[in-house]
C-alpha cells in the first residue's frame, strides 16, 4: 500500500512537467476502467430490474397465489409457479445428493491418493468436463443415458416396488421412458461435479502439509487424516463450494430441458416427467404473449432470487475461510 | 479414535493383517481401504463419463459429417440433405461479436479491481457482484437482453445475441485479468513509476505486459464458455434456416440453437446435422480450453 501511494505521488508530480497530453490520457484511462467496473454492477442491477419489471403484471394479477398455485393453463390464462419450483428444487437436491459425494471423492483422490504423474491428466479431464456445453449433456442424457436408464433401472425398480406403500409411489414409473425428475437430477449431478471437485481440490491443497504430516506421523490412516484433520479444516469452504454447485444446478437450462420430460403436473414419483423454472422458460418463452410472457418473467424473477441467495451465501462461506 | 472401534480379540486373532499394517486394528484398516477404493472409483466414474460423451459424439457425429455440412444451409422441414454452413458462420460471428464487446470492458474492469481500487469498498462490491454474475443462470441473461434489446428493437437480432454472450464473457475476463495482474510483483510497478511514468503507462506497458499470457488465457476461456451457450441465444438471436441479413437483424442461425431444435426434431437428416454440429462445437471448445491451459502453463514455467 505504501508503495502504491508513493507511486501515485511520483506519477502526479513528474508527468505534467514532461508531456501535456499524458495527464489527460491518464485520467481517461482511469475513468474508462472505473466505468467498465461500474458496468458490471449496472448489468446485475439491470437483470434484477428487468426481472421485476417483466414479472410485475403476473405478480399483480395472481398475488401470492402465483407461487403456490399448480395451475399452468395457457388457454385460460391462469398461471402458477409451484410445479416448476418443486421441479427445480427436487432436481437440484438430487444433483447434490449424487454429485457431492462423487466430487469430494474426486477431490480427495486428487489431493491425497493420486500418484504425482497421474495428477495433471486426471485434473485436466475433470476440468474439461466443465467446458463441455450443457446442450451436449442434454443430448447424451436423452439419447444415451435415458434409454439405458429406462431399461435397466426404471423397469426393474418399478416392477419391484409396484404396490408397496410410499416406495411404490416414489419409485414407480407409469411409462418407463427414461426421462423425468430423477434423470434430470443425475445429469445435473454430472454437470456440477467438475465445479465442486475443482474448488474442493483447491481448498484441500491450501491446507498446510504440516497438519497432514503430523497426523500421519502419529500413525493415522488416510481415512483418519481426511476425517479428523482435513474435513474440519476445510469444512465451511467446502459447504461454500457445494452451494456454488447448487447455484449451477438451479439455473441449468438446456440439459434439463432435454431430459425432464416437460410435463406440468405434480407427481409423487421421481420417475415421472416434470419441469423446472428454467426448462419452462426455455420451452414457452418464444411463443408466449401477454400475460404468459409476464408469468414466465415472474418465474425468472423467482429463479433469480433463489440463485442469488444461494450464490451470496456460497461466496461468503468460501471467502471467510480464505481470510482466516 | 480408540473408542470408536468395536473389536473383539477373537476376530483380531483370526484375521492376520498384512505386514505393512503391523498391529493396526482391522476396522481402521477397512475404513482406510474403503476410502481409497471409493475415491478412486469416483474418479474413474468422472473420467468415464467424459470419455463416454466424447465417444458418443465421435460415433454419431462423424457419420453425419460430409462436405455438404460445411457448404449448404440448414434444410427446411421435410427436405433432404442440407448442411449447417449458415449456423457455423453465424456462431462464429456471434462469438466474435461477444468477445470483441467483452474483452475491453472485462480487461479494463479487471484492471480497475487490481490496480486502482485495490483496497476500496467499491472494488470489493464489484468483485462480489462479478462473482455472482460469473455463476448466474445464463437463461436469465437471455431474458434480460430480450427486455433490453429485442423488445425495443422490435425483433430478434444477432446484435442482441452478441450482447447476451458478452455479458456472460465479461465476468470470466474480469476475474482472470484481476487474478493475473495481482501476480505481477509490485516492484515492477515501482520501477516504472520511478522512471516517471504515469499510472496508465505503468499499467499498459508493465503490468499488462507482464500478465499478458494470463490475460489471453482469460479471453480464450471466455470464448470457450460462450461458444456453447444456448439458453441466452434462444431469446436473442434465435435461429434461422437461411443465411442471415447483412445487418444481422432478424434471426441469426447459430450452432447451439440449431442443435437444440434439430436434435429434438422428427426428421432423420436434421438429427444427423445436429450430431455433426455437436461434434464440431465440442471439439472446438475442448481445443480452446486445452490451448488456454497450455498457454498458462508455459507462462508459469517461464
Image (cartoon, coloured by chain):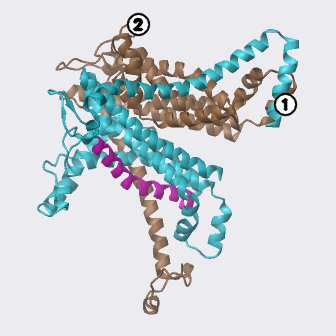
Q: Mark 1 points at which residue?
A: A6
Relative image position of residue A291 (x, y in whole percent): 25, 24
Relative horizontal placement of residue A36, taking residue A47 as reference (left or right): right
Residue at 73%, 25% in the rendered image: B203
Relative image position of residue B250 (x, y in whole percent): 33, 11
Q: Can residue B182 be seen?
A: yes
- The label shown at residue A215 is none
Q: Give the range drawn in magenta.
A: A85-114
Q: Mark 2 lies on which chain?
A: B
Label 1 crowd (10 A; few <14 / some 14-19 / many >=20): some
Residue at 14%, 64% in the rendered image: A164
Give the overall secondary structure of the magenta segment: helix
Looking at the image, do the residues carrying marks 1 and 2 touch, with CB atoms under 8 Å apart? Answer: no
Placement of A246 over or under B242, stated as above or below: below
| Closer to the eye: label 1 or 2 | 1
**How far apart, in angstroms, are the residues tagged by discs 1 and 2?**
51 Å
Q: Chain A is drawn in which colour?
A: cyan
Foreground of the two, B174 or A123:
B174
Label 2 crowd (10 A; few <14 / some 14-19 / many >=20): few
Q: Chain B is drawn in which colour?
A: brown
Placement of B192 over or under A199, stated as above or below: above
Relative image position of residue A78 (x, y in whole percent): 19, 31
Foreground of the two, B165 or A14:
A14
Q: Can residue B142 be seen?
A: no
Q: Mark 2 points at which residue?
A: B247
Relative horizontal placement of residue A272, taking residue B177 as reference (left or right): left
Foreground of the two, B192 or A143:
B192
- Please check the rendered image and state whether residue A107 is part of the magenta-colored stretch, yes or no: yes
Q: Mark 1 lies on which chain?
A: A
Amino acid at each position: 500500500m505504501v508503495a502504491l501511494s508513493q507511486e501515485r505521488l511520483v506519477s502526479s508530480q513528474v508527468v505534467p512537467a514532461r508531456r501535456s497530453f499524458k495527464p489527460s490520457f491518464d485520467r481517461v484511462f482511469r475513468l474508462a476502467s472505473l466505468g467498465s467496473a461500474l458496468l458490471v454492477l449496472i448489468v446485475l442491477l439491470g437483470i434484477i430490474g428487468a426481472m421485476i419489471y417483466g414479472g410485475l403484471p403476473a405478480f399483480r394479477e395472481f398475488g401470492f397465489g402465483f407461487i403456490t398455485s399448480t395451475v399452468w393453463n395457457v388457454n385460460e390464462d391462469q398461471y402458477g409457479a409451484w410445479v416448476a419450483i418443486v421441479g427445480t428444487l427436487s432436481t437440484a437436491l438430487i444433483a447434490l445428493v449424487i454429485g457431492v459425494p462423487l466430487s469430494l471423492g474426486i477431490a480427495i483422490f486428487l489431493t491425497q491418493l493420486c500418484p504425482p504423474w497421474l495428477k495433471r491428466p486426471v485434473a485436466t479431464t475433470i476440468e474439461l468436463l466443465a467446458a463441455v456445453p450443457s446442450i451436449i449433456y442434454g443430448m447424451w442424457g436423452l439419447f444415451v443415458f435415458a434409454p439405458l436408464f429406462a431399461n435397466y433401472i426404471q423397469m426393474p425398480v418399478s416392477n419391484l416396488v409396484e404396490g408397496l406403500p410410499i416406495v411404490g409411489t416414489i419409485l414407480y414409473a407409469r411409462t418407463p421412458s427414461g426421462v423425468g425428475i430423477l434423470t434430470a437430477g443425475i445429469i445435473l449431478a454430472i454437470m456440477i461435479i467438475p465445479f465442486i471437485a475443482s474448488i474442493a481440490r483447491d481448498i484441500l491443497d491450501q491446507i498446510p502439509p504440516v497438519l497432514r504430516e503430523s497426523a500421519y506421523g502419529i500413525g493415522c490412516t488416510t481415512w483418519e487424516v481426511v476425517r479428523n484433520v482435513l474435513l474440519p479444516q476445510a469444512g465451511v469452504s467446502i459447504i461454500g463450494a457445494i452451494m456454488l454447485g447448487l447455484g449451477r444446478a438451479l439455473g441449468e437450462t438446456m440439459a434439463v430441458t432435454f431430459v425432464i420430460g416437460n410435463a406440468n403436473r405434480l407427481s409423487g414419483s421421481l420417475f415421472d416427467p416434470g419441469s423446472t423454472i428454467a426448462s419452462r422458460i426455455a420451452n414457452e418463452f418464444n411463443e408466449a404473449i401477454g400475460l404468459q410472457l409476464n408469468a414466465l418473467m415472474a418465474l425468472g424473477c423467482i429463479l433469480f432470487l433463489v440463485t442469488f441467495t444461494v450464490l451470496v451465501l456460497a461466496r461468503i462461506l468460501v471467502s471467510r475461510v480464505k481470510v482466516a | 479414535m480408540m473408542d470408536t472401534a468395536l473389536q473383539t480379540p477373537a476376530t483380531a486373532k483370526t484375521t492376520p493383517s498384512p505386514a505393512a499394517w503391523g498391529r493396526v486394528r482391522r476396522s481402521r484398516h477397512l475404513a482406510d481401504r474403503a476410502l481409497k477404493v471409493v475415491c478412486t472409483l469416483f474418479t474413474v466414474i468422472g473420467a468415464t463419463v467424459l470419455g463416454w460423451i466424447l465417444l458418443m459424439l465421435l460415433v454419431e457425429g462423424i457419420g453425419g459429417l460430409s462436405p455438404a455440412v460445411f457448404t449448404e444451409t440448414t434444410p427446411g422441414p421435410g427436405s433432404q440433405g442440407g448442411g449447417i454452413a449458415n449456423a457455423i458462420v453465424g456462431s462464429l460471428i456471434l462469438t466474435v461479436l461477444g468477445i470483441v464487446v467483452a474483452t475491453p470492458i472485462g480487461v479494463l474492469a479487471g484492471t480497475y479491481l487490481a490496480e486502482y481500487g485495490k483496497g476500496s469498498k467499491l472494488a470489493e462490491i464489484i468483485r462480489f457482484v462479478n462473482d455472482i454474475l460469473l455463476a448466474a443462470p445464463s437463461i436469465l441473461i437471455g431474458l434480460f437482453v430480450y427486455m433490453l434489446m429485442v423488445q425495443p428493437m422490435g425483433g430478434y437480432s444477432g446484435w442482441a445475441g452478441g450482447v447476451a454472450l458478452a455479458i456472460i464473457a465479461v465476468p470470466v475476463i474480469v476475474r482472470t485479468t484481476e487474478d493475473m495482474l495481482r501476480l505481477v510483483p509490485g516492484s515492477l510497478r515501482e520501477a516504472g513509476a520511478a522512471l516517471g511514468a504515469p499510472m496508465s503507462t505503468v499499467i499498459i506497458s508493465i503490468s499488462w505486459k507482464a500478465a499478458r499470457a494470463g490475460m489471453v488465457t482469460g479471453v480464450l476461456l471466455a470464448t470457450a464458455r460462450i461458444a456453447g451457450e444456448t439458453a441466452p441465444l434462444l431469446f436473442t438471436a434465435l435461429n434461422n434456416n437461411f443465411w442471415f441479413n447483412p445487418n444481422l437483424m432478424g434471426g441469426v442461425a447459430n450452432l447451439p440453437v440449431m442443435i437444440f431444435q434439430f436434435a429434438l426434431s422428427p426428421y432423420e437428416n436434421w438429427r444427423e446435422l445436429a450430431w455433426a454440429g455437436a461434434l464440431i462445437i465440442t471439439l472446438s471448445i475442448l481445443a480452446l480450453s486445452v490451448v488456454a491451459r497450455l498457454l498458462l502453463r508455459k507462462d508459469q514455467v517461464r
